[in-house]
């Protein structure tokens, strides 16, 4: 299998042993999962299915960011406990992923359940000389990590802009460099707090994933990724803080998906221009929603249109008409070849279209893609 690696900026062989480890950055559960989320997790699902089909064991971790600015702000607005809000939205998320026929992940750890590991990692950052503390705020000093920028390849100017847009607060006067990022911070009066040697507080966003990945998958992950908008700051900072402590690459392969748009703008909770999974399945069967997303290559941005859903439903009907033919030909091998070519799911779907026109059963190929006929 060959996959595009964001850090190396090219398609490279996925070199892995019998057990392939994967880490997919999960949701911050303060609202329902939208299609942008689903597109990421579906990509990792198809990757897992092909790896298992090839004889590998897979261990995929998909974290839950249940302690961060967004969920605490939303819980405050609703007047509820942040953990209750997380539990409610995670239940909805699990239902949505089941509707899309996603494989269960190996683990779904929560940031709030890894505070000891986070504190250990922050402490190790001090021991390595890459962290400093000011008024209870602990920062990672990017000047001490010479490879900063290795994942995103963005210029400093772009990084500063994105940091400001994603809560990085480059104007924080306590920082030695505007790009330095928070490892630990004091909690506000109504926020959860844990004791630490820097005072009571809570973790920064990026350190949570580093601690969970190190605890559950080890120093180096085979495939790490998420949406392209996470390349900076999240993955860049995650790689810097992890590698500064372990001395090993955080990931052998960085996989980033394209962004899903609606009416010309990227879907995001902050903008509110969202299409939800549970809404789609009221208009077509879940298999059609999965098929519509698989018709987009994982690395490409695309614009969601409801026609995609209805076209997928029609496609399913055509494929189902082949189930009684009994002839499968080389369909499954051709689907495998498409997936091995940088997860070319649109190409795999065209294989099934051609097979159906030729009167061959497409059931084995559809099953490998997780599509129930």
Image (cartoon, rainbow, N blue to C red):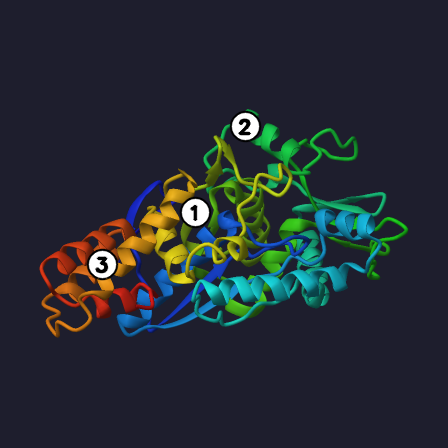
Residue at image mark 3:
318
Sequence order check: which comes first, mark 2 or mark 3?
2
Say left or right for 286 vs 371.
Answer: right
Question: Cβ–Cβ below 8 Å for labels 1 and 2?
Answer: no
Sequence order check: which comes first, mark 1 or mark 2?
2
The one of 373 and 6 positioned closer to us in this rendering: 373
Sequence order check: which comes first, mark 1 or mark 3?
1
Which dot marks residue 215?
Answer: none
Residue extending farthest right: 189
Label 1 vs label 3, nearer the camera? 3
Residue 321 occupies quadrant: bottom left
Say left or right for 338 vs 57.
Answer: left
**Quadrant containing the N terminus in the rendered view:** bottom left
Q: Residue at x 27, y 60 (%)?
A: 317
Residue at image mark 2:
158
The one of 299 and 249 positioned closer to us in this rendering: 299
The correct choice, above or below, for 223 with respect to 91 in the image is above
Q: Residue at x 83, y 47 (%)?
A: 136
Q: Residue at x 46, y 52 (%)?
A: 40
The correct choice, above or below, for 278 with respect to 266 in the image is below
Residue at image mark 1:
256
Category of crowding for the residue at label 2, using alpha-carbon neighbours closer than 10 angstroms: few (below 14), some (14–19), many (at least 20): few
Residue 340 occupies quadrant: bottom left
**Quadrant containing the C terminus in the rendered view:** bottom left
Q: Residue at x 44, y 66 (%)?
A: 102
| Residue 255 shows in the view | yes
């Amino acid at each position: 299998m060959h996959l595009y690696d964001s850090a190396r900026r090219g398609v490279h062989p996925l070199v892995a042993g019998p057990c392939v480890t994967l880490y997919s950055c999960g949701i911050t559960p303060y609202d329902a999962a939208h299609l942008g989320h689903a597109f990421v997790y579906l990509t990792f699902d198809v990757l897992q299915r092909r790896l298992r089909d090839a004889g590998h064991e897979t261990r995929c971790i998909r974290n839950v960011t249940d302690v961060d600015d967004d969920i605490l702000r939303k819980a405050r607005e609703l007047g509820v406990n942040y953990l209750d809000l997380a539990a409610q939205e995670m239940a909805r998320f699990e239902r949505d992923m089941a509707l899309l026929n996603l494989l269960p992940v190996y683990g779904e750890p929560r940031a709030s359940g890894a505070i000891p590991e986070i504190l250990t990692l922050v402490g190790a950052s001090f021991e390595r000389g890459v962290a400093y503390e000011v008024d209870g705020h602990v920062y990672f000093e990017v000047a001490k990590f010479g490879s900063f920028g290795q994942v995103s390849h963005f210029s400093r100017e772009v990084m500063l802009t994105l940091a400001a847009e994603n809560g990085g607060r480059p104007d924080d006067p306590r920082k030695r460099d505007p790009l330095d990022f928070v490892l630990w911070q004091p909690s506000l009066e109504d926020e959860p707090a844990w004791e630490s040697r820097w005072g009571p507080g809570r973790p920064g966003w990026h350190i949570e994933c580093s601690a969970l990945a190190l605890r559950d998958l080890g120093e180096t992950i085979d495939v790490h990724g998420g949406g392209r908008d996470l390349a900076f700051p999240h993955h860049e900072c995650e790689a810097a803080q992890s590698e500064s402590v372990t001395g090993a690459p955080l990931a052998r392969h960085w996989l980033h998906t394209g962004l899903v748009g609606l009416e010309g703008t990227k879907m995001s909770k902050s903008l509110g221009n969202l299409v939800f999974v549970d809404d789609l399945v009221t208009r077509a069967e879940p298999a059609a929603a999965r098929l519509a997303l698989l018709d987009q290559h994982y690395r490409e941005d695309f614009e969601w249109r409801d026609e995609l859903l209805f076209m997928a439903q029609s496609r399913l009907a055509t494929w189902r008409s082949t189930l009684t033919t009994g002839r499968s030909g080389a369909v499954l091998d051709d689907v495998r070849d498409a997936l091995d070519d940088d997860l070319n799911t649109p190409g795999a779907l065209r294989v099934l279209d051609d097979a159906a026109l030729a009167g061959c059963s497409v059931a084995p190929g559809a099953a490998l893609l997780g599509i129930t006929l």
